[in-house]
Amino acid sequence: MISRTNALLFGILVILLSASILTGIFSRDIPEDKEPGKSDDPNEIIITPVKNDNSEELIISLYNHWEKKLVKISLEEYLTGVLAGEMPASYEMEALKAQAVAARTLVVYQLPAYGGRGCSRHDGADVCSSYAHCQEWISREQMRRNWGEDFESNFKRIEQAVQETKGQIMTYQGKAIEVFYHSTSNGRTEDVREVFSNSLPYYTSVESIGEENGPMFEGSVTLTNKKFAEVFKSRYGIKLNPDNLASQIKIDGYTDSGRIRTITVGGKKLKATEFRLLYGLNSTDITFVFGKDTITMKTRGFGHGVGMSQVGAHQMAGRGSSYKEILQHYYRGVEITHY
Ligand SMILES: [Zn+2]
């Protein structure tokens, strides 16, 4: 546990370190989308106005990929933008609160002051605004555009979810946990080691109720056999016979959650997660339907399946679960504490 005084000192440290461009301090990957010649001048940092109602407000560095800028923003203010980007504002309040705690935990885990390494893609950023890397974040202006006349009521809901969980994160053995969450599961969540290869004790496969009510539960991709073979060849250099795909695609095994673990295509053994990305499938719960000239890949669920399912959280909340019960269902053995 970190005392409040230390948390404040760490907060100041975060500000100082984040604003610096001493790139040698943290070992980060080379930013993939850095524009050549684009300055890292700290003078370009924009200070976003934040509510100053709490002297212990933690300020973080956010890489805003929409504007390609590093901005400083209070953690709680930032979280409203995450909720607006990550979860429908119409979802149950307890689901929104669970999402707020999960999103806050993700950031605290990454803060250098808490032993984290920041966003590995953007120098000086604690977190970036991309759902494909850290987590989605949108600005107030984007919320207004997305929501139109519902802005006021929607914003009030997400602000309530953030405020009512203020400062709360999930910890395991006293440390912020590494957070994964996803849109929709296939009815069970996935063990983290099936997707990210590292094992974490709080990520076992658990049941996730009501997923079939989510709009993204079922998906399918249909390609001509020829196209399927072309995509495969361009990635692996292996030529498939488009006239007989069924005999060249073999499912090797399933994970405990019923998703495919590995699949052999044209003699090449692949992780299903890799296969999913190659064909842009919603999940690794895949059923193949072989037609005369086409192949259809039907999926259940949307996302990697690890951690909290957002649809499942909404369903649990609708059946009376609190945000703490939701989180402790999807993240086994965690405590909800103040960072
Ligand atoms: Zn990132």
Image: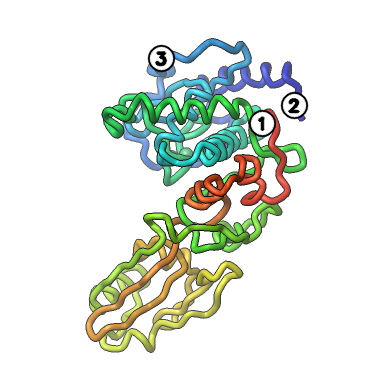
Which of the two discs, 1 and 2, sits closer to the camera?
A: 2
Q: Quadrant of the N terminus?
A: top right
Q: Which residue is nearer to you in this view: 250 or 335?
A: 335
Which of the two discs, 3 and 2, sits closer to the camera?
A: 2
Q: Is residue 28 above or below residue 159?
A: below
Q: Is residue 3 above or below residue 68?
A: above
Q: Amino acid at mark 1?
A: Tyr
Mark 1 or mark 2, earlier in chain: 2
CA gap, disc 3 to disc 1?
26 Å
Q: Residue furthest front?
A: 319
- Give the secondary structure at mark 2: loop
Going 35% across and 78% down the picture, which residue do you hit? 238
Residue 49's spot in the image, x, y percent? Answer: 43, 13
The image quarter containing residue 166 is top right
Lateral position of residue 17 relative to residue 41, left or right: right
Lateral position of residue 333 relative to residue 39, left or right: right
Which of the two discs, 3 and 1, sits closer to the camera?
A: 1
Q: Which mark is residue 114?
A: 1
Going 47% across and 72% down the picture, which residue do you hit? 270
Confirm or reject: label 2 Cβ below 8 Å from ligand 1: no
Residue at numbered disc 2: 2
Q: Residues within 10 Å of mark 3 (few under 14, many from 20)?
A: few
Mark 3 or mark 2, earlier in chain: 2
Q: Amino acid at mark 2?
A: Ile
- Give the secondary structure at mark 3: helix
- Give the secondary structure at mark 1: helix
**Looking at the image, do the residues carrying marks 1 and 2 touch, with CB atoms under 8 Å apart?**
yes
CA gap, disc 1 to disc 2?
9 Å
Residue 15's spot in the image, x, y percent? Answer: 56, 19
Residue at numbered disc 3: 43
Q: Which residue is nearer to you in this view: 322 or 307?
A: 322
Confirm or reject: label 3 Cβ below 8 Å from ligand 1: no
